[in-house]
Amino acid sequence: MCYYLTAVLPENASDGLLLPIISSHQLAFTPLVNPNIRKQIRQNENYFKATGFTCDCDTPLGSQRANRKDPRHNIERKLKQFRNKGWSETKIKRWLEQQDETRAKNERSLQDQMALVMSDIESWIAFLRAMVTSGGTSYVGLLLHWYSAYLSVFTRSISGSSIIR
């Protein structure tokens, strides 16, 4: 179905100190009940959906950049094919220039994407740092979790305005 960023906090985490931080980072920390996760966390820990997004499939947390093959590894083979087909050196030179332009454009696009990824990761680091230095909790655990069912199945209704339970 989807990936979700979920979180674990100790039971004694302070709502008063943590809620402003959670809010200022546009996070939700909606309590979740998942029997499988419950077995894996401590008895005195609570489990939350960290973000307010429908899903977190686009998060850079936990992602790996795919190994990209260098397109130049096939250049010599391509050039040989072009010459066998009767391409002129001028046409081959133009093709090589177009390849260089495309590669440069793709690299700029990749750098722009990486800047966005790094900004998102830095926001998470700032959030985690604010949480643990606030005095409201000694730790925050994050989990990128694949759910094969709708997450709403695991959402617990909350009475009152407190998010952290």
Image: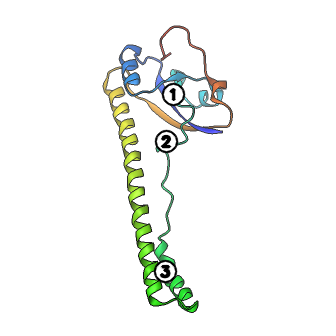
Spot occupied by residue 156 in the image (x, y as percentages of width and height): 60, 18
Instruction: Classify 109 as above or below 131.
Output: below
Along the polypeptide, which appears first: circle 2 or circle 3? 2
Image quarter for residue 47?
Answer: top right
The structure residue drawn at horizontal position 60% and vertical position 27%, both measured from the top left corner, is 38
Q: Which mark is residue 115?
A: none
Query: In whole angstroms, how far apart are the C-alphas of marks 3 and 1?
Result: 47 Å
Q: Which residue sits at x=44%, y=87%?
A: 90
Residue receiving disc 1: 52
* Closer to the eye: label 2 or 3: 3
Local secondary structure at mark 3: helix
Tell me residue 21's x, y (percent): 36, 23
Residue tagged by mark 2? 59
Query: Do the CB atoms of the residues marked 2 and 1 lie less than 8 Å apart?
Result: no
Q: Give the crowd class for mark 1: few <14, some 14-19, many >=20 residues within 10 Å.
A: few
Q: What residue lies at 53% left-to-right and 90% top-to-bottom?
A: 83
Q: Which residue is mark 3?
A: 75
Looking at the image, which is closer to me, 28 or 45?
28
Label 2 – label 3 distance at C-alpha: 35 Å
Query: Is 79 placed above or below 159 here?
Result: below
As displayed, is residue 90 above or below residue 74? below
Which amino acid is tagged 1? Gly
Secondary structure of the residue carrying tag 2 is: loop
Q: Residue flagged by tag 2: what amino acid is it? A: Thr
